[in-house]
Image: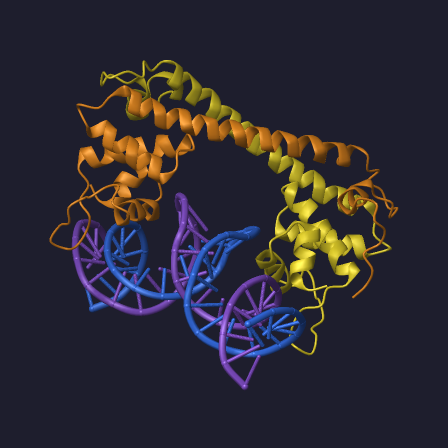
Chain colours: A orange, B yellow, C blue, D purple
DNA sequence: CTTGACCTTCCAGTTGTGGGAACCCCTATC
DNA sequence: GATAGGGGTTCCCACAACTGGAAGGTCAAG
C-alpha cells in the first residue's frame, strides 16, 4: 500500500502519517522509488493510533500504548494507569470548561444584545473599575 | 509603573505582557531608559485581558472585546455576539470531551488492571469492538 | 510526449506563552 | 571605584500536533 491507500483506510491525512513516521510511531519500509510501502501491520497501527488520538490521548501516551500493545508480556495495569491518568486530565478539563461556561453564560444572559452601548459582559470583564481611558 | 509592578497587580507574567504589547493589545510609552511605563489605564486593560483570557476568549476575541470596550458608541449586540460564539465553542468542546470521557471510562472500567496481559482497553483501541464502536 | 495524480523532502506557520542568553540600568554597600 | 543584586531590554528557541505550500521525482494512461 502507498501512503494514499493507508490514509483512506485509516481515516488519517497522509501528512499526519508522514509525521507519525518522522516521530517513530510507524516505520514503513521504502520501495525502489523511495515511496513508503505500508504493510497490513502498519495499517493496524495507524488505525490504533487514530482511535487513541480520537479519545484524546497525547502522542506520548500513544507511544506508550503502542509499546504495550506490542508487548505480549504486558500487565494490563500499565495500560490502565495510562488510561486513568488521561481520564483524570479529561475530568479536570471538563471542570474547567464547565466553570467557564457557567460564568460566561451568566454574562451573556444578562446582556440585552441590542443597539445600546450598556453591556454587562464588558462590565463584568472590567469589574466595574470604570473606563479604561484612551492611549 | 514598570512591567514588574503591573505584572503583580494584573496577575500576569511579565513575558505575557510584553507579548501583548508586541501584538498591539497594549501600548505603554517608554521612558528615557527604554523601560515601558504603564499607566493606570494600561493596568486596567491588562486586568480586562486577564479576565477575558481566563474565560477562554482567544486573543483575537480579546482584541475585539477591547475595541468595543473603548468604543463609547458600541452596540451591546456586538459584544454579545462574540460571547455567544465563544459559548458555542465551549459547548461543542464540552460535548466532545464528554463523549471521550464516556468511551474512555467504559474501557477503563472493563480493564482488570492487574498483572495479566489481557486488556479490553487495548482490544477496544485495536478492533473497534466495545465502547468505541466499529468504523 | 504530455497530462495529471501521486509521491518525495523541506520550510514555515499555527496558539499563547515559557525558558534562557546576553546585555543595560539603578541603587546600595564595601 | 568596584561590585552585587534586582530590575529592565531584545532576541531566538521550544512546545503539541499537525497543516499548508513550494519544488521536484514517479507512474500509468491516452
Q: Is residue B50 visible?
A: yes
Residue A39 coordinates in the image, percent (x, y): 17, 37
Residue at (43%, 33%) from the top-left corner? A56
Q: Is residue A11 visible?
A: no
Quarter holding residue B55? top right
Left or right of residue A23: residue D13? right
Q: How many marks?
A: 0
Quarter holding residue C20? bottom left
Quarter holding residue A124? top right
B90 or A61, which lies in front?
A61
Residue A46 coordinates in the image, percent (x, y): 28, 36
Residue A132 coordinates in the image, percent (x, y): 81, 56
Residue at (19%, 44%) from the top-left corner? A28
Picture quarter with the C terminus of chain A: bottom right
Picture quarter with the N terminus of chain A: top left
A81 or D2, which lies in front?
D2
Q: Residue furthest left?
A: A32
Left or right of residue D8: residue A90? left
In this view, D27 is above or below A135 = above
Residue A73 coordinates in the image, percent (x, y): 17, 23
Residue at (28%, 15%) from the top-left corner? B114
In this view, B91 is above or below B47 = above
Left or right of residue B118: residue D15? right
Residue at (64%, 42%) from the top-left corner? B54
In this view, B17 is above or below C23 = above
Left or right of residue A94: residue C27? right
In this view, B16 is above or below B86 = below
Amino acid at each position: 500500500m502507498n501512503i494514499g491507500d493507508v490514509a483512506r483506510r485509516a481515516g488519517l491525512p497522509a501528512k499526519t502519517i508522514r509525521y507519525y513516521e518522522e516521530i517513530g510511531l510507524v516505520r514503513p519500509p521504502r520501495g525502489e522509488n523511495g515511496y513508503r510501502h505500508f504493510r497490513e501491520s502498519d495499517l493496524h497501527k495507524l488505525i490504533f493510533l487514530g482511535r487513541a488520538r480520537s479519545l484524546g490521548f497525547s502522542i506520548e501516551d500513544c507511544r506508550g500504548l503502542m509499546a504495550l500493545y506490542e508487548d505480549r508480556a504486558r500487565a494490563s495495569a500499565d495500560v490502565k494507569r495510562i488510561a486513568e491518568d488521561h481520564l483524570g486530565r479529561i475530568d479536570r478539563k471538563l471542570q474547567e470548561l464547565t466553570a467557564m461556561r457557567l460564568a460566561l453564560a451568566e454574562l451573556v444572559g444578562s446582556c440585552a444584545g441590542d443597539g445600546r452601548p450598556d453591556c454587562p459582559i464588558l462590565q463584568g470583564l472590567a469589574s466595574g473599575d470604570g473606563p479604561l481611558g484612551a492611549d
